[in-house]
């Protein structure tokens, strides 16, 4: 290893940027695997069976969110920003294992009742299968957070990529042998188990351990984050359940899920960077380097704006994207995807805002406002979905995403003292306009969509470079090499 690598890696922003690039590359692989899974499932399950599978997955994700929102950011910040980080990691593992096992047992017993509440009685067996996934994915998520907090980004990337590959392989095997939606759920269990096993091996921390830590900071910090994170997550995931509940049919739910899952795939490319930024900002705060934490946060916000604007530009080709990935049976998913890509653009702001809130360790003041937003969202879905169907639900989702994104970002900026980069927003807006024009002018039928999207992305990158918004230097590449050497 050369002498320049440690020097570059000591720059928190360069390290955060290079680590984010590493995990984004891993998420790109996961995105491709996820798209392959979605293409396979939509063509082998059909809209009705795919709708049941999607509703079951969303319901279980709602249950897992109670664990994730209170532990993911908590784990990263306490392990990365505390001298007794290893003891906290062990304590969190024990607590999550105990809680999720109890929660999964309750859900397994009352699965039929839960399915009946959401007018989907046929998904009860799927929920029982996914109870095991709830336990495995929650514990595996803690291991992944520990690896991020320890700056072992390559090991963390390997765990999630291996899990996604296992899920895809298991889906081919189980769904292909006639298990249908049950096989798709079982494949998710297999993927989560793989991620957990690799995380356990990489960290060396057993789930059941004797390490002790003062739990007061853990619960205090978890309680601090849980309200805001949970409210944000609910606003982002209740649209599919609203479609299923108010239309009382798996067919529109399946069509909506097709567009939603493509938009969620786009979100997976952005999400890993938030944990890395949180780790970097927590380290800087622990060392008293507040100015460095602000610079790292500003860089992350510019990335969020850049990525969100690109999704908005590419939404012009939503119909072609659906036709290529999902097939003609999901043609009604095109308008839904176009709207939801804009919703994801605003959700990146929520991710940034929530990351800033978590990094400060201060109490946010927007929990009550977000809970009111959840109530208004439920009322809006009840009024809009019966009249306007899936597109109406997508518009409500966009409204919720925009409101929650702006509110959470504003709170995060207030707590951290970060200034909003208005000049960057102007440059990014101009570049995104050029990308939208490019994708609209180029042919996009069938496989021509791929060079179309590539051309639009290249035009976007060139515009950002010409406008002097993004010009990476040598430090980032040196830090990237250092990340690979960990």
Image: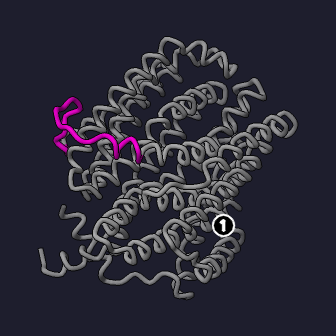
From where the camera sits, is residue 137 visible? yes
Q: Is-magenta flag for residue 207?
A: yes
Which of 302/332 is in front?
Answer: 302
**Magenta span of residues:** 202-221
**Residue 127 appears left or right of 478:** right
x 19%, y 39%: residue: 205
Question: To which quarter of the image does residue 358 belong?
Answer: bottom left
Which of 258/207 is in front?
Answer: 207
Is the residue 179 above or below the residue 50 in the image? above
Question: To which quarter of the image does residue 137 belong?
Answer: top left
Which of 133/177 is in front?
Answer: 133
**Residue 331 appears left or right of 462:** right
Residue on which disc 1 sits? 313
Quadrant of the drawing holding the C terminus:
bottom left
x 63%, y 44%: residue: 260
- Report crowding for label 1: few under 14, some 14 to 19, many 20 or more residues within 10 A (C-alpha): many
Q: Position of residue 184 (x, y in %)?
A: 48, 27
Q: Is-magenta flag for residue 148?
A: no
- Mark 1 lies on a secondary structure that is helix
Q: Position of residue 465 (x, y in %)?
A: 51, 84
x 54%, y 40%: residue: 39
Question: To which quarter of the image does residue 449 belong?
Answer: bottom right
Is the residue 394 above or below the residue 45 in the image? below
The scheme the figure's colours follow is: one colour
Is the residue 206 above or below the residue 282 in the image? above
Q: Position of residue 315 (x, y in %)?
A: 68, 60
Quadrant of the drawing holding the N terminus:
bottom left
């Amino acid at each position: 290893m050369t002498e320049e690598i440690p020097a570059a890696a000591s720059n928190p922003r360069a390290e955060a940027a290079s680590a984010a690039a590493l995990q984004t590359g891993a998420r790109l692989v996961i995105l491709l695997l996820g798209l392959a899974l979605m293409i396979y499932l939509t063509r082998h399950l059909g809209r009705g069976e795919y709708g049941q599978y999607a509703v079951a997955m969303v319901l279980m994700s709602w249950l897992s969110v109670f664990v994730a929102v209170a532990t993911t950011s908590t784990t990263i910040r306490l392990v990365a920003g505390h001298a007794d980080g290893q003891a906290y990691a062990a304590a969190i593992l024990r607590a999550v294992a105990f809680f999720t096992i109890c929660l999964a047992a309750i859900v397994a017993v009352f699965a039929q009742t839960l399915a009946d509440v959401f007018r989907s009685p046929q998904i009860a067996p799927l929920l029982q299968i996914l109870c095991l996934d709830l336990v495995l994915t929650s514990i595996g998520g803690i291991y992944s957070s520990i690896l991020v907090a320890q700056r072992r980004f390559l090991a963390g990337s390997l765990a999630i990529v291996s899990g996604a590959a296992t899920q895809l392989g298991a889906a081919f095997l189980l769904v292909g042998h006639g298990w249908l939606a049950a096989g798709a759920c079982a494949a998710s269990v297999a993927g989560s188990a793989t991620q957990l096993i690799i995380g356990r091996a990489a960290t060396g921390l057993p789930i059941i351990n004797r390490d002790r830590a003062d739990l007061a900071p853990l619960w205090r910090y978890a309680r601090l984050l849980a309200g805001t994170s949970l409210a944000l997550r609910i606003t982002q995931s209740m649209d599919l359940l609203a479609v299923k509940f108010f239309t009382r049919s798996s067919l529109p739910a399946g069509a909506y899920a097709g567009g939603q899952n493509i938009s969620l795939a786009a979100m997976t490319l952005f999400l890993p960077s938030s944990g890395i930024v949180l780790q970097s900002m927590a380290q800087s705060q622990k060392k008293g380097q507040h100015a460095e934490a602000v610079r790292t946060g500003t860089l992350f916000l510019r990335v969020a704006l850049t990525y969100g604007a690109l999704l908005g530009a590419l939404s012009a080709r939503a119909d072609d994207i659906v036709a290529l990935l999902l097939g003609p049976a999901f043609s009604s998913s095109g308008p839904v995807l176009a709207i939801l890509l804009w919703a994801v653009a605003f959700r990146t702001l929520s991710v940034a805002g929530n990351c800033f809130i978590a990094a400060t360790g201060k109490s946010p003041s927007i929990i009550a406002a977000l809970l009111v937003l959840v109530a208004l969202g439920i009322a809006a879905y009840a009024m809009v979905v019966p009249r306007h169907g899936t597109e109406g639900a997508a518009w409500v989702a966009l409204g919720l995403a925009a409101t929650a994104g702006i509110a959470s970002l504003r709170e995060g900026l207030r707590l951290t003292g970060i200034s909003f980069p208005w000049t960057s927003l102007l440059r990014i807006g101009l570049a995104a306009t050029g990308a939208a024009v490019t994708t609209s002018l180029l042919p996009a039928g069938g496989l021509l969509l791929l060079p179309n999207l590539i051309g639009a992305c290249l035009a976007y990158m060139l515009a950002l470079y010409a406008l002097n918004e993004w010009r990476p230097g040598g430090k980032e590449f040196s830090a990237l090499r250092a990340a690979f050497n960990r």
